[in-house]
Amino acid sequence: MNPIINFILLFSMMAGTTLTMMSHHWVSAWLGLELNTLAIIPIISKAHHPRATEASTKYFLIQAASSALILLSGTINAHIYGTWDIMHTSNNLSKIVFTVALATKLGLAPVHFWLPEVLQGVPMLTALIITTWQKIAPMALLITTWDLVPISITLSLGLLSTIIGGLGGLNQTQLRKMMAYSSIAHLGWMIVIITITPSLTLFNLILYIILTSSTMLIMHLSMAKTLQNTTLISSHSPITTSLFLLSLLSLGGLPPLSGFSPKWLILQELTSHHLTPLALTMAVTALLSLMFYLRITYISTMTLPPSTTPLKSSWRLKSNSNTLALSTFTLASLLLLPVTPAMIQ
């Protein structure tokens, strides 16, 4: 793709997200989401491959339908109360439609079916954009309207997402589909706490973006697309293999890595609000996600494929690429646990 066109699309995507984050009007929020969607469609379909075309079509249809529901929600509220201010949404039907629309945009269960299929049809860097940047605008709207969202819906969506995200990733061999189900599970943790402690949802979102970015950048660097490909990461770079293991364990939420802090704080908050059965269920579902993270770490770091001796040292012959972003995200995904006390109320 022409660099100028690529810059225009990325700038439009950032502008759409910024517009949505700053909006207090239904139409401007909808406009930002639409700009965000229309900017990423050419990025998804630029591979000129049938899978890319299929992925872009699915993504466009889902996002267009979700945006239409958001506009419908604003129209219902404006028709009844005469205001287009998002913070003055008072109609129950409008609140429910708005929540379902944003859940569809995010890929929360049970409206998650599009996310694994779209990620499977795009390159790793495009999948990284979809699972990180494209989540910011809908989550910003949810965090802005946290006191308007029905708590029963958020708890149900969150619990179902963590279960589906854990179970769905167990039988996958494609890394992008695994990361899609990982995204569903992590979004479930965010949505379940948003009506109780929205600041904790923001903290979880930031850490999720850092953890997912470090993991998927390593996959991109090593050109790994399946579980079988991960066995070659050690021949590409032994240091990268160790960082890949730690990033995956941090994504699974093991202490003392950064990914442990949001799960710990969310479980503590749920327990303090007398939602102990929900906290216990979510802790158990986290083990399902940890299971397929451990499977990737075992295959990538503890096994070697049948190969010749020169292949085992092929990393010595590769030139070092620019990995500044990877280094930054990896360090953050491993060493941010000390900031946890700042989030304790």
Image (spheres, rainbow, N blue to C red):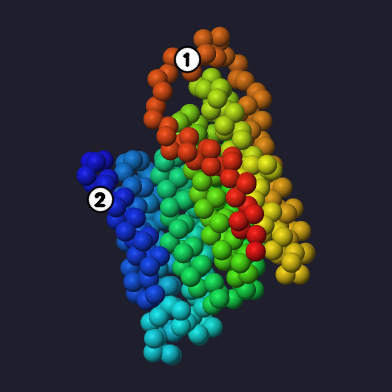
Mark 1 element type:
helix
* Image coords of residue 265 (percent x, y): 67, 57
Instruction: Give the residue displayed 34% in from the left and 74% down from the top.
Output: 27
Mark 1 vs mark 2, CA separation in Å: 38 Å
Q: Is residue 160 visible?
A: no
Instruction: Give the residue displayed 43% in from the left and 90% down from the top.
Output: 81
User: Callout 2, which amino acid?
Assistant: Ile
Mark 2 element type:
helix
Establish if 312 lies above or below 273.
above
User: Callout 1, which amino acid?
Assistant: Arg
Q: Quadrant of the N terminus?
A: top left
Q: Quadrant of the C terminus?
A: bottom right
Instruction: Give the residue displayed 57% in from the left and 66% down from the top.
Output: 198
Residue topped by disc 2: 8
Q: Quadrant of residue 76?
A: bottom left
Establish if 36 lies above or below 89.
above
* Image coords of residue 63 (percent x, y): 41, 62
User: Residue 316, which numbered label?
Assistant: 1
